[in-house]
Image: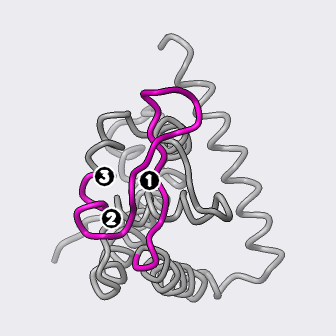
Amino acid sequence: MDQTPTSPAEIAAAWQRERPGTPTDSIEIVTPIWRLAKMFADDRARVLRAAGIDAATLDLLSVIRRSGPPYRLSTRELARRTLVTAGAISQRVARAERAGLIRRGPGDSGPRSVAVSLTDEGHALIERSVDSVLGREASLVAGLTPAERATLADLLGKLTADVRDRMTRPAP
C-alpha cells in the first residue's frame, strides 16, 4: 500500500522524519497555494475555451475595458498595466486586431505612439467572457464567508508584498 503523504502537514512531517532539521515551515502555506493556483488555472482555461477566448486576449481586452469609455489605451499603457513586455503587447494587439476585436490608431503622445481601442465585437466578447470567468471564480470561493474572503485577501496581499520585497533582496 502506498504511504505517500498528500496533505501539506503530512508532507512536512515526512520531511522532518526523513531529514530532521529541514526547513518545512513554508510547506503548509506554499503547497496549498500551488495546488489552488493549478486548480484555478485549469478551471479558468476550461471556462475561457468555452467562451471562445484565450488568456492573453482576455487580459488585453480586460485592461482596455476597465479603462472606461472610450475604451482606448496606448500600447505603452497596455504594457504597463498588463505587466508584459512591449513585444508581447505588440503580438497580442496584432492577434486581436486580426480577429476584429480591437483597432489601432494614432496615439496622443507623439507621432510614434499607438492607441488601441475595442471594436463592438471586442466589447461584446469581453462582456461575455468577464461574466463567465468572474462568475465561475465567485462560485469557486463561495465556500468562504464574506469575512473569511476579506481576511484571506488581506493575508494574501500581505504575503505577496512581503515575498516581492524579499525577492528583490540578495539571497543569503
Tell me if label 1 and label 2 are in contact, CB under 8 Å. Answer: yes
Question: Residue beneath label 2, please?
Answer: 5
Q: Is residue 99 magenta?
A: yes
The amino acid at mark 1 is Ala
- Image-based side of 21 in relation to 57, left or right: right
Quarter of image, res 49: bottom left
Q: Which one is in front, 168 or 100?
A: 100
For residue 39, above or below residue 76: below
For residue 148, above or below residue 22: below
| Sequence-wise first label, 1 or 3 | 1
Where is residue 152? Give x, y as percent: 71, 63
The amino acid at mark 2 is Pro
Quadrant (top left/top right/bottom left/bottom right) for the N terminus:
bottom left
Badge 1 marks a residue whose secondary structure is: helix
Query: Total marks drawn?
Result: 3
The amino acid at mark 3 is Arg
Where is residue 134? Give x, y as percent: 56, 79
Q: Residues within 10 Å of mark 2 (few under 14, many from 20)?
A: few
Q: Which mark is residue 13?
A: 1
For the point 36% across and 69% down, the residue is 101
For the point 52% across and 64% down, the residue is 62
For the point 22% across and 63% down, the residue is 98
Quarter of image, res 150: bottom right
Badge 2 marks a residue whose secondary structure is: loop
Give the foreground label among 1 and 3: 3
Magenta region: which residues?
A: 92-121
Q: How is the image coloured?
A: one colour
| Sequence-wise first label, 3 or 2 | 2
Question: Residue beneath label 3, please?
Answer: 92
